[in-house]
Image (cartoon, helix red, strand yellow):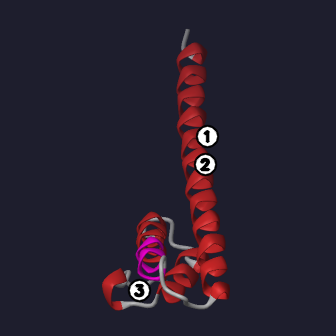
Amino acid sequence: MNTAAPLQPKHTDWKVLYRAAILETNKSVLPLWVSEAEEAVLARGRDILYDNSDPEEKEALEDALYALRAFKAAMAAHQSCLILSRRTSQRERRHEGD
């Protein structure tokens, strides 16, 4: 959906990066968006760790971090499946030639 180059987390609200990451459809930049969003969420969490900030934002940060990490795990699992699928296809082609 969003094909623009990722923004720098230092200059962007964590919510913007989070939304950009979860809405991204370009697989080539998706890992970068997810990593930048995760960094921004963690940085904001450190910023508000000891102050009396909005408890709803703290909960939103926890939810966002959980979702981003689940997203990263799903991307890694998908990548592993693609690799296994390619290897299986290569083996099958070699056996067809025998």
* Residue 95, x across and y down, in percent: 58, 14
Residue 67 vs residue 77, the one in the foreground: 67
Q: Which residue is mark 3?
A: 4
Q: Secondary structure at mark 1?
A: helix
Question: Decide: marks 3, 1 in contact (CB < 8 A)?
Answer: no
The magenta segment is 42-48
Query: The N terminus is located in which quarter?
Result: bottom right
- Amino acid type at circle 2 is His
Question: Decide: marks 1, 2 in contact (CB < 8 A)?
Answer: yes
In the image, residue 77 sits, relative to residue 93, either above or below, namely below
Q: 63 left or right of 76?
A: right
Q: Secondary structure at mark 2?
A: helix
Residue 22 vs residue 62, the one in the foreground: 62
- Quadrant assignment, res 72: bottom right
The secondary structure that dominates the magenta segment is helix
Q: Which residue is mark 1?
A: 81
In the image, residue 12 sits, relative to residue 82, either above or below, namely below
Give the distance between the C-alpha atoms of the residues marked 1 and 2, in whole angstroms.
Answer: 5 Å
Q: Secondary structure at mark 3?
A: loop
In the image, residue 98 sits, relative to residue 3, either above or below, namely above
Q: Any mark on residue 78, and which? A: 2
Query: The C terminus is located in which quarter?
Result: top right
